[in-house]
Image (cartoon, rainbow, N blue to C red):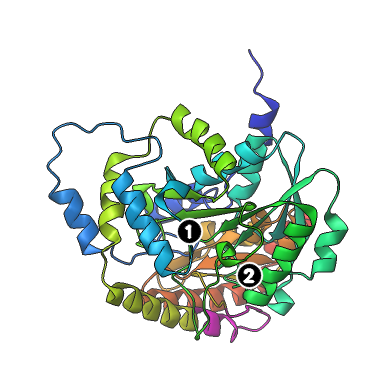
Amino acid sequence: MPSISQKGQTMPASPIRKLVPFAEAAKKRGVEVLHLNIGQPDIHSPEVALEAIRSNQLNVVEYSHSAGFESYRKGLAAYYQAHRIPVSHEDIIITTGGSEALLFGMMACFNPGDELIIPEPFYANYNAFAIQAGITVVPLRSTIHDGFALPPATEFEKLITPRTKGILICNPGNPTGALYGRQELETLRDIVKKHDLFLFSDEVYREFCYDGAQHISAMELPGIEQNVVLVDSVSKRYSMCGARIGAFITRNKELLATAMKFAQARLSPPTYGQIASEAALHAPKSYFEEVNLEYRERRNILVDGLNTIPGVVCPKPKGAFYCVAELPIDDADVFCQWLLEKFEHQGHTVMMAPATGFYAQPGPGKKQVRLAYVLEKAKLQMAVECLRVALDTYARTPAMAGQEAASR
């Protein structure tokens, strides 16, 4: 029997989806699973986008240009310009989700063995994309005790070697909800400029900033115009995860031409996704105002509620719709599986993502979980109550103490 490739064996399982079989089994037992494990909002997609799909007059679903519809790219460029991001449609390649934009960028910018510094915890699939591109992730630890703030420049400098080729940030952050301000981004700008690195900026949660905070794009930073790659997506902005439309954006013409080769090799991005995404650009301002208010209220219910549970620590996010909580447990993977297999409260249980998968090595995330506040407020209140009861029950279950000890 032929052997599986080393790359295939190294690919990590998704920490967000690996517990799905246990959730499915819980549902078959009649338990309602509160899904806080995945960033799939229950917010309605913009009506203007849905109507564009319903009313289209296509007789043939053709390939689009490999860079995406020109009309959509022009509309997207206007959107960015309104957000102080000076790009034209010729700086944009439409991709199959932000994931493909990251893959194109990694393959275009890095050689096998090159190093990419990423503040951690970070979006779990960054590990997977790096493995596919053959590059080495160099994690830079941020901590829950300072709200996952960007580490100082001296900590970046310690990690830079002759193999270092880039830095990747997510702002606002998945999984932490941390938002980097201008001063932090200018620190990054100086490091990137000094060492002539690429700066990948994943900004898919741009529209979701709270408590008066303002998003600053890496593309606003002067002096590194040729170094920045902006990664974007409609998935979360318009609650259109299934559209699978993202964008690779750079003002570096040589890099854009290189990424375009990969875009041509996969032929074109999805037609219907582009139709919906172009129409979504016309969503009224009130759409984002209402969504932002809803997420802020959901955040407060979940995060404030978690911090009332004895032993739980959860910084309040400034952006996105995720938080990372540290729990009074020894093994989040064991606990999250136990919640689905053994626990229910008033017919409910909670599905979360163990934070071990959001670190380059699992150790720092052993007591942490990521939660997405993407459910309606009543369900979030129930989730907090479930976790309160679950943690108390778990602490008084001798068998679980033994299982956690064995897992260490």
Residue 103 in view in this figure: no
Secondary structure category for the residue under label 1: loop
Q: Which residue is mark 1?
A: 38
Going from N to C along the chain, the mark reached first, 2 or 1, is 1
How many residues crowd around disc 2 within 10 Å: few (fewer than 14), some, or many (20 or more)? many
Where does the magenta region start and end?
302-316
Please tell me which residue lies in front, 334 or 119.
Answer: 119
Q: Main secondary structure of the magenta part?
A: loop
**Identity of the residue drawn at 70% across and 61% down:** 120
| Residue 203 screen position, x and y as percent | 52, 61
Please tell me which residue lies in front, 110 or 299.
Answer: 110
Residue occupying the far top of the picture: 1
**Identity of the residue drawn at 76% across and 69% down:** 151
| Residue 133 screen position, x and y as percent | 64, 36
Callouts 2 and 1 close, C-beta under 8 Å: no
Amino acid type, label 2? Tyr
Q: Which residue is mark 2?
A: 394
Amino acid type, label 1? Ile
**Identity of the residue drawn at 55% across and 39% down:** 104
Displayed quadrant of residue 348: bottom left
Q: Is residue 359 above or below residue 214?
A: above
Secondary structure category for the residue under label 2: helix
Q: The C terminus lies in which quarter of the figure?
A: bottom right
**Identity of the residue drawn at 56% across and 35% down:** 258
Q: Is residue 139 above or below residue 8?
A: below
How many residues crowd around disc 1 within 10 Å: few (fewer than 14), some, or many (20 or more)? some
Q: The N terminus lies in which quarter of the figure?
A: top right
